[in-house]
Image (cartoon, rainbow, N blue to C red):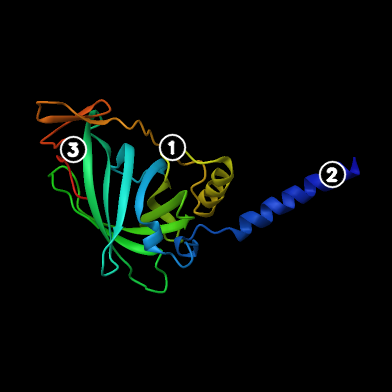
Amino acid sequence: MKYAQYVFLASVFYTVEYSLAQTCAVESFAVKDNFDPKRYAGKWYALAKKDPEGLFLQDNISAEYTVEEDGTMTASSKGRVKLFGFWVICADMAAQYTVPDPTTPAKMYMTYQGLASYLSSGGDNYWVIDTDYDNYAITYACRSLKEDGSCDDGYSLIFSRNPRGLPPAIQRIVRQKQEEICMSGQFQPVLQSGTWGYLANSLSCTVGDCICFKCDRTTANIVVLF
């Protein structure tokens, strides 16, 4: 009986100690050490996401990163987005990244542009919280802060090189990182149906159950740069 009480009290003490030690101040979040954009380059598929306020990609999200000769990283992305709560359209996007502080290359700033009037243009922080380059990556952005330094409006994406998912060992790492950025339990899965397609002899493309116009044979071009 005394042993059980000891275990209980020890677990309570550890929980309290951990809670006191953990901080949700955004500037305290650790990012990938010695981030290497060349190893990060290539195709990634989003498996889970925590949305920000407002418009955000819904599903079939993927991104392909390229490092230019001058070291600048750019990306082309795809996904589906829901407008006005019911209209699902295809999104074909692009982004450019800069590194404000060269000593912390994992903390980047992303600039994006919308080609359609109903899609926004602007910029967000783009932090690579963690990655092993070959299997998973966790990105984070905070758009506004609270007075205590915690995030008021932010988002995060869990990426994988494989659209089918991540092995259990890596899932455990991802869950730990979600806790470290104070977003545990806030993620939702991202559908990867792989249904980007083309309708022959038509000016429309299909992505899942949405239709986009002014397309080529491989991608839906109606929407944006991101």
Label 1 amino acid?
Gln
Q: Which label's residue is closer to the chain start, 3 or 2?
A: 2
Between the residue at mark 2 and the residue at mark 1, the CA separation in whole angstroms equals 38 Å
Quarter residue 66 falls in: bottom left
Q: Name the front one of labels 2 and 1.
A: 1
Q: Which residue bears the numbered disc 2?
A: 5
Quarter residue 8 falls in: top right
In this rendering, position of residue 103 left or right of residue 73: right
- Position of 142 relative to 51 (above/below): below
Q: Which residue bears the numbered disc 3?
A: 220
Give the residue displayed 34% in from the left and 52% down from the top: 42
Q: Name the front one of labels 3 and 1.
A: 3
Q: Which label's residue is closer to the chain start, 3 or 1?
A: 1
Label 2 amino acid?
Gln
Q: Which residue bears the numbered disc 1?
A: 188
Query: Between 118 and 219, which is closer to the camera in this rendering?
Result: 219
x and y percentages locating residue 57 in the rendered image = 30, 40
Query: Between 115 and 198, which is closer to the camera in this rendering?
Result: 198
- Residue 145 visible in the current orientation: no
